[in-house]
Image (cartoon, rainbow, N blue to C red):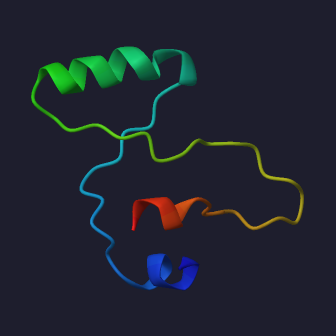
């Protein structure tokens, strides 16, 4: 699954990254404007030497 996500366009049209404490407000505002909103992840600090991008839970969305 992870290789597929790195190779193909998997259909995410737009990503909005906001501070966690603003996520509900932004989601509500976008929904009110007719957008469909999903939370698809979170930004977390990377451990030294760790991969910069880690995808998890993708199986649920396929």
Going 51% across and 64% down the picture, which residue do you hit?
58
Identify the image quadrant of residue 21. top right
Residue 37 on image: x %, y %? 29, 37
Going 70% across and 42% down the picture, which residue do you hit?
44
Q: Which is more toward the observer, 51 or 33?
A: 33
Residue 8 on image: x %, y %? 36, 82
Going 86% across and 54% down the picture, which residue do you hit?
47
- Quarter of the image that includes the C terminus: bottom left
* Image: 53 above or below 2: above
User: Furthest residue to the left?
Assistant: 34
Q: How many marks?
A: 0
Identify the image quadrant of residue 43. top right
* Image: 20 above or below 35: above
* Image: 28 above or below 56: above
**Viewed as shown, does residue 9 lie left or right of 43?**
left
* Image: 27 above or below 47: above
**Viewed as shown, does residue 37 lie left or right of 50?**
left
User: Furthest residue to the front?
Assistant: 60
Q: Which is more toward the observer, 34 or 16?
A: 34
Residue 15 on image: x %, y %? 35, 47
Residue 51 on image: x %, y %? 75, 67
Going 28% across and 18% down the picture, which residue do you hit?
28
Q: Which is more toward the observer, 18 or 58?
A: 58
């Amino acid at each position: 699954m992870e290789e597929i996500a790195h190779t193909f366009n998997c259909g995410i049209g737009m990503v909005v990254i906001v501070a966690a404490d603003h996520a509900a407000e932004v989601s509500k505002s976008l929904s009110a404007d007719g957008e469909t909103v999903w939370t698809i992840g979170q930004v977390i600090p990377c451990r030294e030497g760790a991969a910069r991008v880690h995808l998890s839970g993708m199986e649920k969305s396929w």
